[in-house]
Image (cartoon, rainbow, N blue to C red):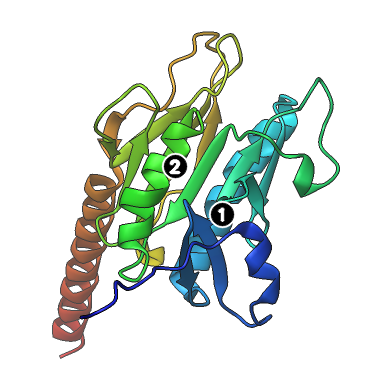
Amino acid sequence: MSMPTLKRQWTVADLSDLPDDSNRYEVIDGELFVTPSPSWPHQTAVMELYTLLAAHVTAYELGDAFVAPADVVFSARRGVQPDLFVVPPFGGKRPTAFDQVKRLMLAVEIISPSTARADRVKKRFLYRDEGVPEYWIVDLDARAIERSTPTESRPEVIDERFIWAPEAGTNPLESTWVPTSRACSTDSVHISGSREGGGVRALTRSNRQMCNMVMMGAERRQRSFAHARLLTRRREI
């Protein structure tokens, strides 16, 4: 008679027994998730988005933006390290240690093949259950952001300029940044004067269309230069 296999239930306290290596260790509802060190495009996307968010939350005193590694512990069986997250004031004061962080304003993960299940399933449920107002999954291959909120059953896919308004009555952050290749990215930022809240929503022309326009313009210029060189050679002959 075979004995049933007992699956270990991990706690946040167990993480202190794991090796201090380049991996990221997280516990979600008793399950251990191990993520290898990130790639160059992954970190590039993290820092680009951090630059936008940190400037905005600092300018309007909304809280503080951080990048991993940093522990966010919701309970003894829920401890994660989001790639990027925004912490609001707690009790009217800014936290001075990560163990004081009791809630998040925004959590962001840059998805990869090794983290797809954790990011799209486990963490989406976790952040929704913990009442995090917005959770973004950044998909570099699809050039899109998947935005989830506690009240929406399905994520909103954004591949255009976005607006982030974490609190009603505050100036939202508007940006043309979306995940894309470094060869044709548009990282301009606009802080709107609008006082209306509304989270993140898609606007106007997508980065993909803008990149196509840039590439088409470059090709036209190359053809023009080639034609000009040909005319010059003919005159010389």
In this view of the protein, can residue 140 be seen by the observer?
A: no
Q: Residue at x 19, y 57 (%)?
A: 216
Q: Using the rendered image of the protein, determine whether residue 195 is visible from the camera's viewpoint.
A: yes
Q: For the residue carrying disc 2, how many other residues have a C-alpha within 10 Å: few (<14), some (14-19), or many (20+)? A: some
Q: Which residue is mark 1?
A: 80
Q: Residue at x 22, y 79 (%)?
A: 229
Pointer 1 and pointer 2: residues touching (CB < 8 Å)? yes
How many numbered marks are there?
2
| Residue picked out by circle 2 | 126
Q: Nearer the viewer, residue 1 or 104?
A: 1
Give the image quarter of residue 218.
bottom left
Q: Earlier in the sequence, mark 1 or mark 2?
A: 1
Picture coordinates of residue 78 (x, y %)?
A: 55, 49
Give the percent coordinates (x, y) of residue 226: 19, 76
Residue 199 is left or right of residue 2, and the answer is: right
Q: Is residue 211 above or below residue 235?
A: above
Quadrant housing the C terminus: bottom left
